[in-house]
Every structure is written in C-alpha cells, then in structure tokens.
Image (tube, rainbow, N blue to C red):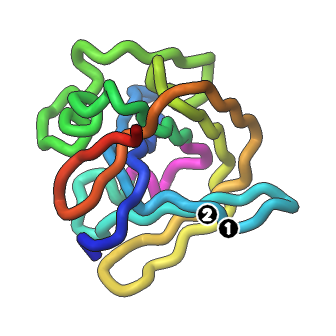
Amino acid sequence: FASFATGVTVITTIDEHGAPVGMTANSFGSVSLDPPLVQWSLRINSGLHRTFVDATHFSVSVLASHQRHIAQQFASRTPDRFAGIEFTQDAGEPPLIRGALAYFICKKIADHRVGDHELFIGEVLHASAHEGQALLFHGSRFLTTR
C-alpha cells in the first residue's frame, strides 16, 4: 500500500469524559455525494478504538503541507496529542485543527469490523475548504504538492 499516495488527516472526537481525542489517518475517503458520506478506518487494536466506536460524531481535518508536525504528533503515542496544537471546538462538537485545508464535521452512521480494522461511515453535517498545498503520504514518508 505504500505505493499509493494519500492525503493526511487528523480524525477527532470527544471521549466519555468530554475530553478531545484524535489520531492521524490516511484512510479517509468519499463514499457518497447524495447524501454526503465519508469513510475512514482504524486498527481494532488501537487504544482509541473503543472511543471512536462509542462516539456519535467525529471530525476530519485535512492537513496542509506545513502541518507535518501535527500529523506526526497525532500519530505518536504521546498521552496528550493536543499539547501545543491550535484547534477550535464548538460546544459538544469534536475539535478541528486550525490551519487545515478542509474540515468535515460528521455524524457517525455506521461502523463495521472488516479484517483487522473498524470501518467508520459518517454523514457530513458541515464542511469547509481553504486554499493551500496538501500534505501527502507516500512510500512511508510525508510529501507536499507543488
């Protein structure tokens, strides 16, 4: 799969205590335009698996080329992945990473165990996009568009 270039996202939600949680994912994609549906997947042995299965909503921040450090931090095992990261969060909604190229706030409508991953499907409730260069992942390394 390393031969396939993807965009890089941070997927976030709120845990059972109301705290923000998030992770880096490159498995994000479109499922349907009408209604607008998106998908992403997470390893079932991830420490965040249960939190995302239990969540009713999630958000997706599509990272810009200057946000490599954010992708790396949210891919790490550091306990507070939000430390030092600028984000916005409306009451009751999952956080969004500031400066991202695009945002999607989604209601989770399904999750399915498929192989060693959980596949999540979300209905897009709100989306926005901004100008800029994308952060990409290819060949097990980060790249940017030019």
Residue 16 in sight: no
Earlier sequence position, callout 2 versus callout 1: 1
Toward which corner of the image does residue 97 lie, by quadrant? top left
**Residue at the image point whose x is 38% and y is 56% from the top:** 26
> Residue 54 magenta-drawn?
yes
Residue 43 vs 145, above or below: the answer is below
Say which amino acid is labelled 2.
Ile
- Callout 2: helix, strand or loop? strand
Residue 34, percent across and down? 87, 61
> Residue 88 magenta-drawn?
no
Say which amino acid is labelled 1.
Val
Residue 106 vs 1, above or below: the answer is above
Q: Which mark is residue 10?
A: none
Give me the C-alpha separation between circle 2 and circle 1. 8 Å
52, 81: nearer the viewer: 81
Residue 73, percent across and down? 20, 33
Crowding around mark 2 (Cα neighbors within 10 Å: few <14, some 14 to 19, many 20+) is many
Q: Is residue 117 left or right of residue 74?
A: right
Crowding around mark 1 (Cα neighbors within 10 Å: few <14, some 14 to 19, many 20+) is some
Residue 138 vs 102, above or below: the answer is below
5, 95: nearer the viewer: 5
Tag 2 residue: 121
State yes or no: discs 2 and 1 in contact (Cβ < 8 Å). yes
Q: Is residue 123 left or right of residue 10?
A: right
Instruction: Please state which of the two labelled residues, at mark 2 or mark 1, is closer to the viewer.
Output: 1
Tag 1 residue: 31
Residue 123 in sight: yes
**Residue at the image point whose x is 42% and y is 71% from the top:** 118
Q: Which residues are magenta?
A: 51-58
**Residue at the image point whose x is 64% and y is 62% from the top:** 30
Residue 62, percent across and down? 49, 39
Quadrant containing the N terminus in the rendered view? bottom left
